[in-house]
Image (cartoon, rainbow, N blue to C red):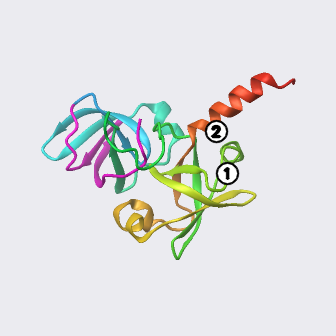
Amino acid sequence: MFTGIVRERGRVASFDDGRLVVASTLEPAVGDSVAVDGVCLTVVDARDGSLAFDVVAETASRVKPFGDEVNLEPALRAGEPLGGHYVQGHVDGVGRVRSLDRGRLVVEAPDELLRYCVEKGSIAIDGVSLTIAALHADALEVALVPHTLEVTTLGALRPGDPVNLEADVLAKYVERLVGARLPE
């Protein structure tokens, strides 16, 4: 479980044969979970200022390619403040940046993900917890404060760039529970 509050940007050192290595000052133990651009991955090696993760083919096929820098967040620990929203690190889909202008980020998103989005609801974009400011027929819009633009990878986004998207898990549970009670 994560909150979507990024702790640092890590530099991707390599991604070969399913092994992702990221330079980082985080100090998780082997076996700990870390969200990497919003993808929950298990630390398989941690030493000399780097973290290594094994990325299985199933995961790689459902997320955007890892760039030069990635957003990193260690798993939430009991007693830590919940400053963002509940984020599982299970990417629901990949969107595309339509625009980033004056702190307003518009992301084209698949219909199967947009159905879980509501204005003032939560969305994780590349692992960053954000509030949906507006919905469009084929996209969602969020407002980014200068701090978020500075400390995450979101400030470097350009039109056409892919982003990992995770909808609020509560919306998925509501759909499942209500759908089971409705006649077909």
The magenta stretch is 1-29
- The amino acid sitting under disc 2 is Ala
Residue 136 x/y as whole percent: 72, 60
- Indicate the quadrant where residue 112 lies: top right
| Residue name at image x 68 percent, y 48 percent | 114
- Comes first in the chain, label 2 or label 1: 1
Residue 91 x/y as whole percent: 52, 40
As drawn, 18 above or below 6: above
Q: Residue furthest bottom?
A: 102
- The numbered dot on residue 171 is 2
| Residue name at image x 22 percent, y 46 percent | 26
Residue 150 x/y as whole percent: 36, 68
Residue 131 x/y as whole percent: 55, 56
Q: Nearer the viewer, residue 14 or 120?
A: 120
Q: Quadrant of the C terminus?
A: top right
> In the displayed structure, does residue 19 sit left or right of residue 134?
left
Residue contact between numbered discs 2 and 1, judged by CB atoms under 8 Å: yes
The 10 Å Cα crowd at callout 1, few under 14, some 14 to 19, many 20 or more, is some
Q: Secondary structure at mark 1?
A: loop
Q: Is residue 126 visible?
A: no
Q: What distance separates the C-alpha of mark 2 from that of mark 1?
A: 9 Å
> In the displayed structure, does residue 125 sit left or right of residue 170?
left
Residue identified by numbered label 1: 118
The 10 Å Cα crowd at callout 2, few under 14, some 14 to 19, many 20 or more, is some
- The amino acid sitting under disc 1 is Val
Q: Is residue 11 magenta?
A: yes
Q: Quadrant of the N terminus?
A: top left
> In the displayed structure, does residue 47 sit left or right of residue 113?
left
- Indicate the quadrant where residue 107 lies: bottom right
Q: Is residue 163 magenta?
A: no
